[in-house]
Structure formats: structure tokens, C-alpha cells
Image (cartoon, rainbow, N blue to C red):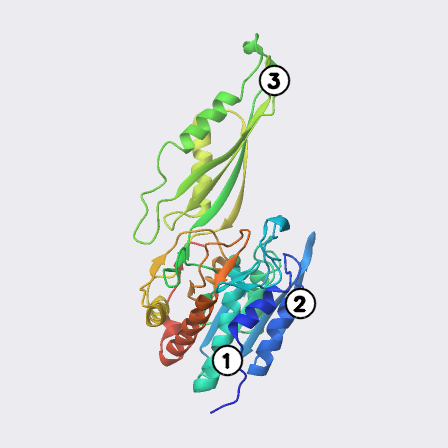
Amino acid sequence: MTSEPVADPIALTQALIRCPSVTPADAGALDVLIQALEPLGFVCHRLRFEAEGTPPIDNLYARLGTAGPNLCFAGHTDVVPPGDLAAWTANPFAGTIADGKLYGRGASDMKAAIAAFVAAIGKRLAAKGAPAGSISLLITGDEEGPSINGTRKVLDWLVKQGEVMDACIVGEPTNPHYLGEMIKVGRRGSITGHLTVHGTQGHVAYPHLADNPLPRLIRMLAALTAEPLDQGNAHFQPSTLAITTIDVGNPASNVIPAKGSASFNIRFNDEHTSEALKEWIRRTCDSVGGPYDVTFHVAGESFLTPPGHLSGLVADAIQRVTGHRPELSTTGGTSDARFIKNHCPVVEFGIVGQTMHKVDEHVSVRDVERLTDIYVAIIDGFFAADNVTHESVSGKA
Ligand SMILES: [Zn+2]
């Protein structure tokens, strides 16, 4: 028997919640983690990144062991703002427990999962000793913010250090209603377009002297939304295009405006790439004609870790602890898995997400304990198996 300290996942979640780490503030959250990880034998690298026009962000890469394979747990300690404090039943940064629920900003998204993973490592070490390989944590303070000085830069740093991850579990809250309901094995991509159609301003009574851009804008938007982008496939729901705003800002009823603009967002599956969508959007607007310009912001490409060894061992661990066989899903918003998938197979599994980003965010204390047991089973399953490194990642990044 060994005498490694075993962290209590509930107390550790509370300690993390008591750090008001609203992006970009760290507020001591990484120190709490380092203090839990170093006694377990982890070598901790605190990584501060900054870029022009963005606040500096603290991140953490911690590794136990030097051999491969390296199982990485990824997550974020930053949280969204609590909003109206008066709307909360208790202080969002107190970590209050009432009726079996642990309250606080970040409880669900995603401090409880980080605490559960650290506690799981302690349990594993106490029960079976160090695994034949390495366990690591990649924790960022910039997931809820612009995600510029976070996971992406940590991954670049890892490559420079020659660090290799063989599989990654991202602890985002993936379960809609109950623990064990859902694993994420991929995500849709996201592209936002800002379209401006140009014309010539003039008097509404003399339209031949003006060129109204608005009928063209309407026709372009109609053409973009006329047909479904696809029908979805075995792993993805159909892609969607949502017009988010149409702006002319014309206060006069007797003036034809010089321009009109609109924005839209496409959540796309792995039948598209952002580049192909940009081309399709330009072609569609060209078919209407007239002067316009369009700019794009791509938040991420779609990706899929094909259901296989990694998702199988995670699903097995979940079923053993909860009795539920989880759905393998690609629904929902983006996460830092979109960066990690370029480095190794990645699946996401965390706590129940029902209250994330909401007032009175909370998790079930029992769920945090069961999530800890699931992570122990994942660690045991990973290091009992072989060939994890042979799994491939597909995607059109
Ligand atoms: Zn999150």
C-alpha cells in the first residue's frame, strides 16, 4: 500500500469555486490545483501567455510520469461572470452545500470535473500505484474568454517541449439531464459571416436616381436559407444557418439607404469545411449580383473522433459506475477539444450541464463522487489496454 494523499473531490471543488476566476482572472485557482497535484508527484508548469491587446492568462500543464502512453485531462478553471449577484440564493463564490447540491459559479462548468479528475488520480495511486505511462492535466484560464492565450498556446508549447499526448479527456459538462447520459465525440464547426450590400442613396420618389441595396440583401439572405445545407449523417445532426441580425439603421422614410448589412452563423457538420462554406456563400451572393462585401470569423472546424477504443473505454467506465450506456454525441457548442483534436484522439465527458452559466449554478454532490469513480475507471481502463495510440482522428481542419 502507498500513502499518497487522496483529495476529496467535494472539498477541492469548493476550494476552486472560492477562487473567483472570471476570465481573465486566475484568482488563485491554479495554485489550488498545484497544491493538490504536487503531493501526488506531478511536475507542474505554470504557463503565462499574452498577446497584443489581450490580458495575460495563466495556464497549467502538469504531468505525472515520463513514459508513454500519456493520458491527458483537459479543462478550464475560468468561469463566466455571475451576473446579478442579488439573483443568487447564495454567494456564487462561497461553494455552499445545501440539500446535497454544491452551489457556485463554475460548479458545473467545470470545476467539479477538474476536482473529480484530480481526486481520481489520488484514488488510483492509492489503490494500484502509478500507471505504466503518464497522466497529465492541461488546464487553461482562457476558455470562456477569447481563447487566444489558452489551450491553443499550451498545445504549441507542448509540441516545442516534445510532449506527446496519446489520448485526451475534456471534462466539459456533457450530460444534459443525468450523469452518464452523453459523451461528446466531436463537435460541429462554427462560422459567422458579416455581409454588407452596397447601393446608392437617394430620394424614394426618384428611385431611378438611386440604387437600393436592400432588395439584393433580402434576395441574398433568401438564397442562403432556401435549401438545407445537408441532411446530417450517422454522427452529426444537419448543419444549420441562422440569420442573427439585419441592420440598415435608416431613420428616414423618404430616403433609400446606401447600404444594408446582415450577420449569420452556420453550425456545420463534417460534410463541410469553413473554406468550402465561404466559397458557397460568395457564389450565392454573386448569383444575386451587385456590389457587396462579406467577412468571416471561423470559431472552429467540425471534427469527429470516430467511435472506437477511447470512446468505448469511457462508455464502459460510465456504464460500470452509473448503469447507463451513454449516447455518443456531437451536439452543442464549441470547446477546446477543437484544438486538442489536432494532437490526439479526444472525447469529452464531465458532469451534468443543466445549470451551466446560469444563476444558482450547482452540481449534485453525489454526482461529483460518481464522476470521480468514472474517471478512476477510465484511468484504469486506459492503462490496462494497449494500442490507444493507434486510434486515428478524422476531421477536415
Ligand atoms: Zn466549459
Q: Position of residue 61 (x, y in %)?
A: 58, 71
At label 2, the amino acid type is Gly
| Number of numbered tags placed on the structure image | 3
- The answer to whether residue 51 of the structure is visible from this angle is no
**Which residue is painted at 42% across and 74% down in the image?**
373
Front residue of 14/387: it is 14
**For residue 111, side relative to residue 313 (left or right):** right
* The label number, if any, that marks residue 122 in the structure image: 1
Amino acid at the residue labelled 1: Gly
SS at mark 1 in the image: helix
Q: Can you identify the residue that label 2 sits on?
A: 28
Q: Amino acid at mark 3?
A: Gln
When asked about the image quadrant of residue 56, the answer is: bottom right
- Considering every residue shown, the one lying at the far front of the view is 99
Nearer-N-terminus badge (3/2): 2
User: Could you tell me residue 77's position as x and y percent?
Assistant: 58, 63
Residue bearing the label numbered 3: 201
How far apart, in angstroms, are the residues tagged by discs 2 and 1? Answer: 21 Å
> Is the CB–ligand 1 distance for label 3 below 8 Å?
no
